[in-house]
Image (cartoon, rainbow, N blue to C red):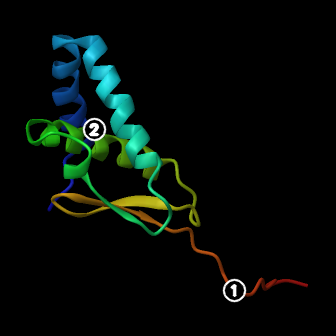
Amino acid sequence: MKTPEYKDLVNELIDLCRLDNDRFWKFYRKVTNVIASIPEGDIIDIRCHVSVKSIDTFRKIAYLYMLDMNAHAKVNDDYYEVVDEYHIKHVATFRPSISRKFYR
């Protein structure tokens, strides 16, 4: 499954926002809260969080959120990825088991 382009997501979501601004932002916050609350290493099934008719909008908001988060991430930060059509994973931060210094 290919991730949509950022500009395409924004354009589609702006149209939804214009239809009903308050409802859109309420749903947007719900989606971002669901994603942000995924424990490191866990996977969620988005069908458990929204109705069937809202899955497409959930996906678009989730993609936008993940693109924003990943764009600002540092090398060792945790991140989110789409596993398949209905699952999102919170990939854990890389933590080396031994701290080594490469200089003296």
Callout 2: 10 Å neighbours few (<14), some, many (20+)? Answer: many
Q: Identify residue type, mark 1.
A: Ser
Q: Position of residue 81 (x, y in %)?
A: 34, 61
Q: Nearer the viewer, residue 73 or 61?
A: 61
In the drawing, does residue 40 fall left or right of residue 28? right
Q: Residue at x 25, y 31 (%)?
A: 10
Of the numbered discs 1 and 2, the one sitting upstream in the chain is: 2
Q: Residue at x 44, y 52 (%)?
A: 70
Determine which quarter of the picture holds residue 83.
bottom left
Query: Element type at marker 2?
Result: helix
Which quarter shows the N terminus?
Answer: bottom left
Which quarter shows the C terminus?
Answer: bottom right
Q: Residue at x 27, y 12 (%)?
A: 21
Q: Identify residue type, mark 2.
A: Ile
Q: CA distance from mark 1 to mark 2?
A: 35 Å
In the drawing, does residue 91 fall left or right of residue 57? right
Q: Position of residue 91 (x, y in %)?
A: 45, 67
In the rendered image, the vertical position of residue 23 relative to residue 13, given as above or below = above
The residue pinned by badge 1 equals 97
Query: Element type at marker 1?
Result: loop
Callout 1: 10 Å neighbours few (<14), some, many (20+)? Answer: few
The residue pinned by badge 2 equals 61
Q: Position of residue 23 (x, y in %)?
A: 26, 17
In the rendered image, the vertical position of residue 16 relative to residue 40, given as above or below = above
Q: Nearer the viewer, residue 60 or 39?
A: 39
